[in-house]
Image: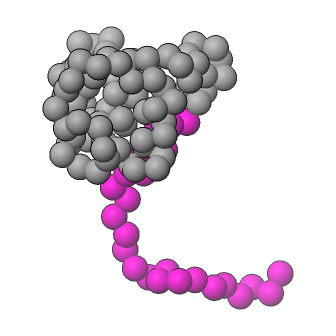
Amino acid sequence: TTGKEAGVNEDSKLYAASILKLAYLYYAQDKINQGEYTLDSSFKYIPEVNSFPGSYKPEGSGSLPKKEDNKEYSLQQLITKVTKESDNVAHNILGYYVTNQSDGA
């Protein structure tokens, strides 16, 4: 190696607001790989999904309703919303059900 480095804004501090969403996506994929869920598995959007420790404020990014609607959303829909829109509500639904935050409710 040459020992040389290159960077763009390498001295800038960045706020990693949604980085935690990657862990939830990874965990969801792991559950799919283990056969616990499929992309067709569905989860109901209830009030509790926005109030567990680690949930994001629903008012943030994304197109899912900001207030619970008691509708079912497939795992495929939730993963797509998190990856394409950084949807906070989709993240919260994943967190509540897929990562077992609902066990404490």
Q: Residue furthest right?
A: 1
> Across the whole image, how many numbered discs are drawn on residues?
0
Q: Tell me where residue 64 sits by quadrant.
A: top left
Along the line of sight, the residue nearer the viewer: 91 or 27: 91
Along the line of sight, the residue nearer the viewer: 39 or 34: 39
Along the line of sight, the residue nearer the viewer: 45 or 14: 45
Q: Report if residue 19 lies within the magenta region.
A: yes
Residue 52 picture location, percent across and down? 23, 27
Along the line of sight, the residue nearer the viewer: 21 or 89: 89
Colour convention: one colour
Residue 26 lies left or right of residue 87; in this view the side is right
Residue 26 picture location, percent across and down? 55, 36
What range of the chain is rendered magenta?
A: 1-27
* Res 101 visible: no
Query: Is most of the magenta stretch helix, strand or loop?
Result: loop
Q: Residue at x 35, y 44 (%)?
A: 87
Q: Tell me where residue 95 sits by quadrant.
A: top left
Q: Residue at x 31, y 47 (%)?
A: 62
Residue 100 picture location, percent across and down? 39, 18
In which quadrant is the N terminus drawn?
A: bottom right
In which quadrant is the C terminus drawn?
A: top left
Vertical position of residue 63 compared to residue 43: above or below: below
Q: Report if residue 28 lies within the magenta region.
A: no
* Res 25 visible: yes
Vertical position of residue 62 compared to residue 50: above or below: below
Q: Tell me where residue 65 sits by quadrant.
A: top left
Residue 45 lies left or right of residue 12; in this view the side is left
Residue 105 lies left or right of residue 44; in this view the side is left
Q: Residue at x 59, y 30 (%)?
A: 29
Vertical position of residue 36 compared to residue 82: above or below: above
